[in-house]
């Protein structure tokens, strides 16, 4: 299938001897229909099918800040260990709450002294994008004598996992995207496709709202409700996940996946002005549908985290 190369602005294309020459900073799309590739506001974007073939791309190999989408790698690093005990109890430390305050990060509002499971912490880190939950997981699965040492050793594990997966242009510097973490649209989509092969991960990221309980420090029961910040869920037909991210440096980011008629598409938008519209237009192009124009975004509860 021939590739079509277009730019955001009008591109002068010359065809000579079977070679297509185009302007720099291209948008590349593999033709799946007679419709032209969509224009997206994101500075970087990618869309791949279940076979790893690129359906759409914009600056797919350019380095970009990734914000909280880094938590996809955090979860994958844990879940790729087949021996991981998802029911392992983790006592919530005050340090986890302090980390949220220090970084002005999104939170699952874990309460000091509560005992939550690894499984619950995955929901808490991936749905409300809780930096406290991400810190708890890194502290639990890292190595060292102090919280900081264990977290840093876990970040080393994340980078090792990235190397193993062939994410050659991705750099993980934190467990929640608050540091110098960077990736490319292509690398991030590849990571997402890998993560979505895990049943636990896939179940977590498709959940809109998760209610659970945990033993509290005072001997009573704590009740938690976590809402998924990914507003594409229930807004676009076939969406199955997976993660939002927003910082001043990274802008609006979204990693998404959708299934229709046996076809699975996985995509990324990085530094977007309207990530959900961008994602919907890309999916429309890949599926040959026309749903983006009428898409109504699922509203979050007033007290939900924003990410």
Image: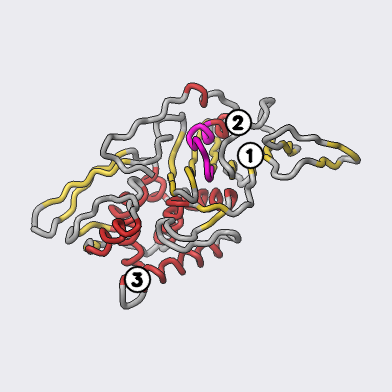
Q: Nearer the viewer, mark 1 or mark 3?
A: 3
- Which residue bears the numbered disc 1? 56
- Which residue bears the numbered disc 3? 148
For the point 61% across and 45% down, the residue is 51
Q: Nearer the viewer, mark 3 or mark 2?
A: 3
For the point 70% across and 42% down, the residue is 26
Question: Which stretch appears magenta?
Answer: 269-280
Q: Quadrant of residue 177?
A: bottom left
Tell me the quadrant of the picture where the C terminus can be found: top left
Return the x and y of residue 196 as percentages of the image width and height.
47, 48
For the point 67% across and 38% down, the residue is 29
- Colour treatment of the image: secondary structure
Vertical placement of residue 1 versus 204, above or below: above
Q: Quadrant of residue 99?
A: bottom left
Vertical placement of residue 266 versus 217, above or below: above
Q: Earlier in the sequence, mark 1 or mark 3?
A: 1
Circle 2: is it few (<14), some (14-19), or many (20+) Cα within 10 Å? many
Return the x and y of residue 242 as percentages of the image width and height.
44, 44
Q: Are the residues tagged 2 and 1 within 8 Å (C-beta)?
A: yes
Circle 3: is it few (<14), some (14-19), or many (20+) Cα within 10 Å? some
Circle 1: is it few (<14), some (14-19), or many (20+) Cα within 10 Å? many
Q: Is residue 86 visible?
A: no
- Which residue bears the numbered disc 2? 285
């Amino acid at each position: 299938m021939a590739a079509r190369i277009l730019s955001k602005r009008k591109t002068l294309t010359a065809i000579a001897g079977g070679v297509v020459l185009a302007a720099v900073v291209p948008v590349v799309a593999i033709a799946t229909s007679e419709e032209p590739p969509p224009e997206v506001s994101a500075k970087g974007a990618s869309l791949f099918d279940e076979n790893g073939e690129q359906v759409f791309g914009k600056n797919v190999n350019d380095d970009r800040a990734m914000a909280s989408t880094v938590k996809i790698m955090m979860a994958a690093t844990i879940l790729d260990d087949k021996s991981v005990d998802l029911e392992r109890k983790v006592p919530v430390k005050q340090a986890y709450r302090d980390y949220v305050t220090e970084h002005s990060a999104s939170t699952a509002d874990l309460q000091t002294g509560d005992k939550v499971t690894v499984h619950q912490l995955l929901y808490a880190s991936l749905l409300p994008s809780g930096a406290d939950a991400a810190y708890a997981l890194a502290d639990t699965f890292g190595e060292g004598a102090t919280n900081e040492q264990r977290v840093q050793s876990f970040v080393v594990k994340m980078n090792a996992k990235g190397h193993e997966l062939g994410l050659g242009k991705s750099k993980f510097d934190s467990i929640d995207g608050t540091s110098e973490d960077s990736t490319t649209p292509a690398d991030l989509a590849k990571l997402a496709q890998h993560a979505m092969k895990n049943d636990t991960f896939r179940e977590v990221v498709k959940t809109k709202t998760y209610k659970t309980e945990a033993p509290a420090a005072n001997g009573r029961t704590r009740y938690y409700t976590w809402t998924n910040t990914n507003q594409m869920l229930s807004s676009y037909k076939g969406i199955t996940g997976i993660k939002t991210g927003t910082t001043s440096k990274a802008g609006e980011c979204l990693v998404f996946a959708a299934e229709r008629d046996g076809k699975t598409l996985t995509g990324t938008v990085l530094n977007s002005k309207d990530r959900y519209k961008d994602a919907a237009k890309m999916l429309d192009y890949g599926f040959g549908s026309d749903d983006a124009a009428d898409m109504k975004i699922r509203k979050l509860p007033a007290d939900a985290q924003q990410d």
